[in-house]
Amino acid sequence: MRFCRRNIFSLLYVCSIFLSLSACSATPDKLLSSNTHFTNPIITGGYPDPSICQLDDYFYIVNSSFEYYPGLPIHRSKDLVNWELVAYGLQRESQVTGAVNLVDVQSNGGIHAPTIRCRKENGKNRFYIITTNVYTPTGKNAKTEFVNFVLTADDIQGPWSDPLVLEGAPGIDPDIFFDDDGRVWYAGTHSPENPTFPGEGEIWLQEIDTASWELTGERHFLWRGACGGTWAEGPHLYKHDGRYYLLIAEGGTGFNHAVMIAVSDDITGPYVPNERNPIMTSRHLSYDYWVNSTGHADMIQLGDGRWYMVALGKRNDEQRMSNMGRETHLLPVEWEREPFWWKEPKYDWPVVSKESGRLEKAYPLPFGSRQQPNINFRDEFDSSKLGLEWNFRRFPERRTYSLSESPGYLRLFSQSGSITERGRASLLGVRQKQSDFVYTVAMLFNPSTNNSEAGISLFQKDDNYINFTTKQQNNKIYLQLFVAQPEDPASSMKSDTSSDPVSRKVIQSAELPKYRGEIVFKVESKESRNTYRYSLDGGKTYQDFAQSSADIILSKGYTGAYLGLYSSSNGSSSEDFADFDWVEYTLFPRN
């Protein structure tokens, strides 16, 4: 018999959903999540660099996943505001252990800025994802490698092909464009041959032979950006009004992030920038606006002619940042022709969020269907497969976990490795989706090896995490809260932090003389404070253990925070394991 009472927890879960919906309707802005308006972000948690397409009744979005596995998460929606995670483009070993390396990839490396496109070919569905894997080999003076590749599938849920590598394609952030005449084009970003300053980017274009997946013909250099060209990247091409439009990101992925656009009569250029660039940004707003760092966008035209844009942005929840990192937002777009009587030609330009010119928290619903919050999460591990929400840092080692050795439980083996740069620990998690939350986990753990530990982990990077675990020391069981933080806050933005000093320390430790192998962990995060609690009676009563600030795993880099499960024998050979009965994540409403 399980030591949890699932019927009680199911009732509590339903109640938590009701409370979260009530919290939405009680917000000062009555438009949020109403019958007429939706709330941004539309996909919460660390889902940056969105790209969107539509086929038949569904819209699809793919996001960057960096060093996490499975990679390239794909959501689908019928109404643009309610999104379901349905697949990953990188979902099996053969895809990530060759030219695309997610085995020992560095922090902030891995899968960058994908583009998804979907179309009918000979009456059948066809899906394409084109993206970059960024990998820095170990060793002094190692040079970063950029592998640009394509994945294809006939069904969004796969199977997706093994990576089709595009040789001779430098740089990052590729786009694939299917022109009306049947030609297919690659648009990418690289550092120009003679940059005028460090960080200058340039958008380039070349035709693709999709039979061989080779670049062919002349390479064209299109644009270095509109506002200085700092980190000009993330290109997407569109056809509108008989012309080609080139949308890019510029200004870096921080407060100066922005979306720029240019137009040309010919796909190969020359491109004329919009004189009113940027067309979407938060760089001109207060640092205290509700969202910042908005940019890296993609646009889509609906069947009725309307246009929308998806873009990343950081919520301003903690120190002008967010534990969730960069998330996916939705904005309305309208095209306007230049009004100048003296100017020819007069171009159409997209106007984003025309009423205010900024990313708003709420907009009218695109299709009238109400937005249903999907923040809450519960997994009782009754399936034979791990749920789609779960991610690992890098491709996991064999025998990291099992769902079959103790049916109804997730068994996490206490491997010798711990959380280290480029390492593969027994660690997995789900994305944190709101700043205020309750995270509860029921675990069975009876170690036989000293220094074996298991419990929960709130993690952001290999040098930035909080572990709340039980640990055997001197044949006794201790409960401890362990924190790792980079001593240099800027290191979270570096591509390889292996040489950066890390502060690792035990915040609280206490023996558990009444521990009998069963424990329920609970973390309550509210108003910028985390409270850590535990129960030894199956969740009937909880004891306070420790507190910390909620910004320890604050996202300063490319990815958001995860709430996870962890087990390690800390360097010893061990047969220990932890069995996790259930995991629950619910919204903790703000007052």
Image (cartoon, grey):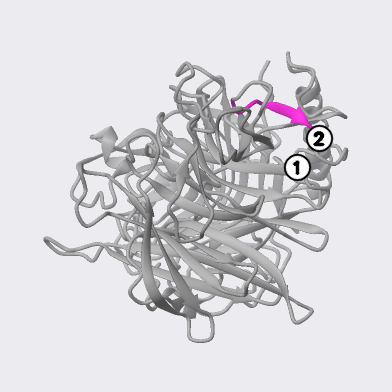
Q: Identify which residue is drawn at 83% across, 48% down.
A: 304
- Dividing the image into 4 quarters, which one contains the C terminus? top right
In front: label 1 or label 2: 2
Q: Secondary structure at mark 1?
A: loop
Residue 91 in magenta stretch: no
Does residue 531 appear to the left or right of 135 in the view shown?
A: right
* CB atoms of marks 1 and 2 within 8 Å: yes
Q: Height in image: 535 above or below 65? A: above
Please state which of residues 224 and 7 is positioned toward the viewer in this rendering: 224
Q: Which residues are magenta?
A: 358-365
Residue 359 in magenta stretch: yes
* Picture coordinates of residue 393, whole percent (x, y): 44, 58
How far apart in space, not on screen, are marks 1 and 2 (Cα)?
8 Å
* Picture coordinates of residue 119, whole percent (x, y): 70, 69
* Picture coordinates of residue 589, whole percent (x, y): 69, 24
- Dividing the image into 4 quarters, which one contains the N terminus? bottom right
* Residue tagged 1: 81
Quarter residue 15 falls in = top right
Q: Height in image: 314 above or below 23? A: below
Does residue 548 appear to the left or right of 242 in the view shown?
A: left
* Residue tagged 2: 365
Please state which of residues 263 and 590 is positioned toward the viewer in this rendering: 263
